Amino acid sequence: MTTLSNHRSRKVRRATMSDVARLAGVSIKTVSRVVNDEPGVHVDTAERVLAAIERLGFRRNIGALNLRRGSSTGTIGLVLEDVANPFYSGLTRAAEEVARRFGRQVLTGSSDEDPARERELSLEFCARRVDGLIVVPAGARHGYLMPEIASGMPVVFVDRPPGDVVMDTVLVDNVEGAASAVAHLARHGHRRIAFLGDAPSIFTAGERLRGFREGCVAAGLRFDERLVTMGPPTADGVAAALRQVLDGPSPATALVTGNNRITVLALRALAGAPTRPALVGFDDFELADLLDPPVSVVALDPGVLGKAAAELLFARLDGDGSPPRRIVLPVRLVPRGSGEVGP
């Protein structure tokens, strides 16, 4: 008697080129010519081979084929913080569009801000012989990639720079973006502006805090450490941070939130409050323009970021041997309502 567990443990054999040749009544060489779309096969013969392929469910082992030829595997690797984050979804889609133009597919994984996971994913993609790698760094140590880089694999870092190697990097102007948010709120009369940022160890969070500080100086505002909270964005953490800056005798009248996650958590914590501070968030997010009031943001297009990183990677694959480049993309302030109210 055959049990269900026996079915599960039995390995199903994939159809081979020999199986196709046997069913179609042709040589393996003929099957190879049909599979690889080579000339010299009669139409009737090709139709028999294609029918056999369809019946057997035969699929080429593209990875093995390319390894034998010593050529491209047709893939690039993309290591992100979190593929579920809409920001990184937009970046991924743009990288896929560029890869498609060059006949490549994108393998994607999430590091969850864990340097060990970032290393694991990067090396796994390298073991799969991807043609190149795009990495959103979770850590500051990337020497583990040097053997791959030395062997000729191009690596592009995006959104954050690597910590201990000099490689192609595509960033956004985080400092200018945060400074412009402060300037915008100051023009609407705010003198007590708070900043809620992500963990300070994250490059983008640190740069946006620097931009906030510089924005305060440029606007003639006293930088007050008591109005700054940095930490991983959680519902409880953001709610506590809001209480810290909005309660007391000299509360903040305006907020700059350091990324879209913090913005959303702050809006939830402020829902139903009788009075709400003016707010400018860093990063746009879906439905921000439909809220009441619509949310003003410092916007950067993740698609532009992903496109720039992927195009730089494929330039390297195409033979560009120039020194490592550092590209900084501009941001723009989008006034919608939440940041245009007075104190």
Image (cartoon, rainbow, N blue to C red):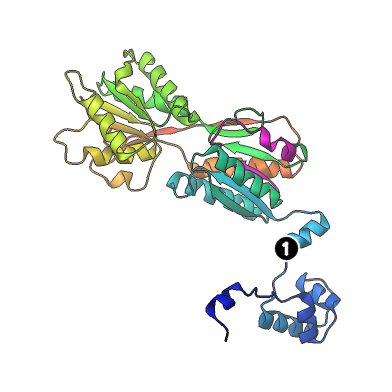
Amino acid found under the numbered disc labelled 1? Ile
Mark 1 closeness class: few <14, some 14–19, many ≥20 residues within 10 Å = few
Residue 106: percent from the left, percent from the top? 61, 53
Q: Which residues, given as a range, are shown in magenta?
A: 131-149
Instruction: Name the secondary structure under disc 1.
Output: helix
Q: Is residue 140 magenta?
A: yes
Residue 171 picture quarter? top right
Residue 267 picture quarter? top left
Residue 279 picture quarter? top left
Q: Quadrant of the N terminus?
A: bottom right
Residue 291: percent from the left, percent from the top? 26, 45
Which residue occupies 81% across, 73% down? Answer: 32
- The answer to whether 150 appears left or right of 342 in the picture is right
Which residue occupies 16% across, 18% down? Answer: 249
Which residue occupies 65% across, 49% down? Answer: 125
- The answer to whether 337 appears left or right of 140 in the picture is left
Which residue position holds label 1?
62
Q: Nearer the viewer, residue 236 or 284?
A: 236
> Up-down: is 98 above or below 204?
below
